[in-house]
Image: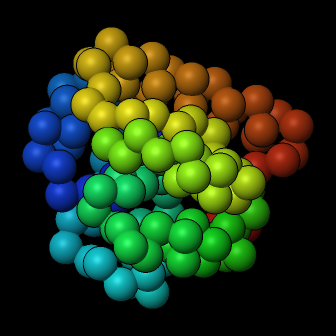
Amino acid sequence: MKFLIISNDNELIEQAKSVKPESHELELCSHNFDPLDIVSAYCSNRVNAIFIDDDFVSPNTLKVMQSLRNFNKNLLIVFLTSNESIELGKSILPLGVHFYGLKPLSEKVLANLFESMEKLINKNKSNNLYTKWS
C-alpha cells in the first residue's frame, strides 16, 4: 500500500517512517503549497490514502480537500492539525475525512492509524467501494 504525506513537519514524517509496516510505501510532498501542485502530487504517486497536514497547507486547506474529493470521492484522507478550533473541524469533516487528529501524534497512534487504514482499504476493495486508479 502506498501513502502520500503532505507535510513539512519533520517529526511527523520521521515518526511515520519509523512505524509504518515494511510493506507500505510513503511518498512525501513537502514543498508544494499550491492546491493544484498537491493534487498533481497525488495523481503522479497513485496512492491508496493521503495524510494532509493543515499546518503545512493552510490557508488552502479547504481548496486542497475539495480538489482531492472532486478528483476521487473514495480517497481515504487523514487530516492532521495543531489547530484546536472547532470551526476548522466543522468545515473539514463534511469533506469526508476518515481520521481527524491533533498534532503531535504519538508513535502508537500513528502505528494504529496505518493498521486501520490498511483494514479500511482492504474492506473497501472487497466491497468494490475503492478503486485504485482504474
Place residue 80 in its image quadrant.
Answer: top left
Question: How many callouts does the rendering have?
Answer: 0
Q: Is residue 127 left or right of residue 74?
A: right
x and y, in percent, of residue 58 in the image = 36, 68
Quarter of the image with the C terminus in it: bottom right
Residue 76 visible in image? no
The front one of 58 and 21 is 58
Please tell me which residue is depicted at 13% across the width and 38% down the height of the picture.
11
x and y, in percent, of residue 25 in the image = 34, 44
Query: Height in image: 34 above or below 83?
Result: below
Please tell me which residue is depicted at 19% across the width and 30% down the height of the picture.
15
Query: Height in image: 95 above or below 78?
Result: below
x and y, in percent, of residue 55 in the image = 29, 56
x and y, in percent, of residue 106 in the image = 27, 19
Which residue extends farthest right? 127
Please tell me which residue is depicted at 71% across the width and 75% down the height of the picture.
70
